[in-house]
Amino acid sequence: MSAIDDVMKYIATNEIRWIDLQFFDIKGKMHRISVSNRKLGEASFGSGIRAADLHEVFGESEQGELVLLPDPSTLARLPWEPATVRLLCDVIVAVKKERFLKDPRYMAERVETNLAAAGVKSCLVGSEVDCYIFDTVTADKTTRSRGVGLLMDSREAMWGPSPMSNVDNGAYVNSPYDSMYAARTQICETLEDSFGMMVGAHHHGASPTAQQTFQMSPRTLKSAGDAVNTLKFVTKTLATAVNASSTFMPYPVEGERGSSLGISMSYWKTNENNIFYDGKEEYGQLSQTGRYYIGGLLEHAPALSLFTAPTPNSYRRLAMEGFAVGWSVTERNALVQVPHTKKNVKEAKRVLYRGADPAANPYLAYALVAAAGLDGIKNKIDPGDPSEKEGKKKRVEKELPENLYQAIQALENDTKFIKGLVPSEMLGDYLDLKLRQHRESLKGVTGLELQKYFNV
């Protein structure tokens, strides 16, 4: 029985009345259209479903009318709406049945195809995702011009009256100071039981004010993007159900480290051959191919930032972190790390890129990180010595952008590694979006500015 047959049988035998067709725009924001079960047939998985005017989301398409193509492998019953299932969708052109070039899920597929052509059977991606869950968030939108109008409250906050606050550090704190343990557990169990997405671990985040961390188990590149977006969907929905507020904003609390998206990757030529692993290599058991992959990440790190740190707020988090554009097994401030907690275990060998945050569109972020690493392998880009070692092969140190505009400039000066991967239609729209966001950020007045410069 095919995956399509499984979907149709499940809907018919479980009293499912509504199909949530979920899809994503260029920013990574989830959209949905709910259709009756009568509108979904086996033909829908080949020709797509026209349920709404998708130009409202993507703008005018020169390719033609757009429809949604359900992915049968993503079927999941919504636990809070028992008569509804969700299906993630690709966006296609109705008449020609060709892929829509601005669909971010298609971007992930293009990179997977490129990896396969280079002999990489699978790219496995693990995601460590931070977010905040506040007890209440109140926005005073009517008097915005009078000053900052957003109030965030948490029983863990240093500014709050509760004795639960974690004054110095929130990393791995225990109950009762880890006040959101039950909420995290419910999120993880919903992801596993309802959506089939495994969570390796969860814990209180490193920042003290109600930050949460989820370690998503490794998945293929496109599927890893599905998992992160589903985590956001579940977390925000469950938080709203109890009148709480969740945010994946990179830097919501001044003075704290902010939220990151740790991207761990490994390349496999076969199910038994992790090409990043070399058991004879003394330093981290990382292969020469793995070093070239890191060379690609470091070479293209400034340009990557436009996709991995995609908002003006992202650069506040990067300023707090103070990453060095280098690599290491042990140095915590290195942009690229090689985890080495298990010796002689090829399944565990991976490379971690730490310059991303959860505001990123995961399909684009994962695709571009993979593309940068592949460029390093193809061109044998030397990453230089690890950060903690003094040697003769030190790279010319690069700096990460300090703001979104610098990231735009970095990408415009370094597009060769994405040539043929990112369609010009998508890249043009993405650059326009980022430039608009940068200009908008210049017009706002922050609380810090009011405090420091009101009396100039």
Image (spheres, rainbow, N blue to C red):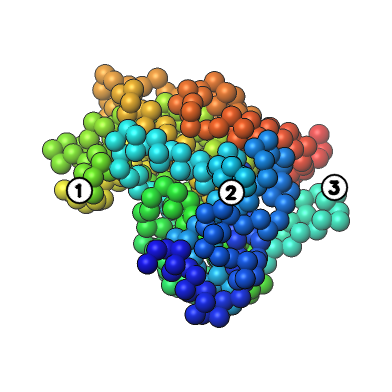
Residue 16: % across, % down: 57, 76
Image quarter of residue 300: top left
Viewer-proximal residue among 255 and 404: 404
Crowding at mark 1 (Cα within 10 Å: few <14, some 14-19, many 20+): few
Name the amino acid type tagged 3: Ser
Q: Residue at 36% across / 62% down in the picture?
A: 200
Question: 344 or 33: which is nearer to us?
Answer: 33
Q: Residues within 10 Å of mark 3 (few under 14, many from 20)?
A: few
Q: Quadrant of residue 335?
A: top left
Which residue is labeled 2 in the image? 91
Could you say whether the residue bearing mark 3 is in a helix, strand or loop? Answer: helix
Which residue is pictured at 32% across the width and 33% down the height? 118
If you read the primary sequence from the N terminus, does the residue marked by circle 2 or circle 3 appear first?
2
* Residue matched to label 1: 272
Front residue of 234/407: it is: 234
Can you give x and y, in whole percent of width and height, for residue 433 in the image? 68, 37
**In the rendered image, which residue does mark 3 sit on?**
145
